[in-house]
Image (tube, rainbow, N blue to C red):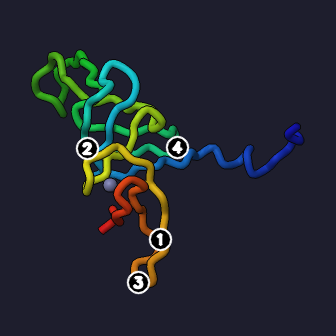
Amino acid sequence: MERAGNSKADKKKVKKVHVRTGDVVLVLKGKDRGKRGKVLRVIPKEGRVVVEGVNIVKRHTKPSRKVMQGGIIEKEAPIASSKVMLVCPRCQEPSRMGRRRLENEGVVRVCKKCGEVIDK
Ligand SMILES: [Zn+2]
């Protein structure tokens, strides 16, 4: 049983997102299941990521000063980071990542399938 008033759990609502901007991920759930795309944005506060070409929503916009022409704009909407899996840039497989400490580079991410370091 969890005791009430666990300050660590209460205060830190920021979820740890396992992917970073620029990573290629595979979508596991939802209408874009099976798609691969690059991570454009990570929103740690919500535990969400924006992936290129994934979860496209249509926005009906009115013309404004910013957007001269109104109409329908297609834009990526954020999806939960738990719905994506990191694709290893070396073996092209959706893989789990481990961490390894290197003397010169600090902690790096390592593909659990091929064992390659995936951080540059
Ligand atoms: Zn790999």
Along the horizontal axis of the image, is 103 left or right of 71?
Answer: right
Query: Real-space Cα distance between discs 4 and 3?
Result: 31 Å
Query: Real-space Cα distance between discs 1 and 4?
Result: 23 Å
Residue 35 visible somewhere in the drawing: yes
Q: Which residue is mark 1?
A: 107
Q: Is mark 4 within 8 Å of ligand 1?
A: no
Q: Which residue is mark 4?
A: 45
Q: Local crowd at mark 1 within 10 Å, few (<14), some, or many (≥20)?
A: few
Q: Which residue is mark 2?
A: 38
Q: Residue at x 24, y 28 (%)?
A: 75
Q: Secondary structure at mark 3?
A: loop
Along the horizontal axis of the image, is 44 left or right of 93?
Answer: right
Q: Residue at x 42, y 62 (%)?
A: 109
Name the amino acid, label 2.
Answer: Lys
Viewer-nearest of labels 1 and 4? 1
Q: Which residue is mark 3?
A: 104
Q: Nearer the viewer, residue 38 or 90?
A: 90
Viewer-nearest of labels 4 and 3? 3
Name the amino acid, label 3.
Answer: Asn
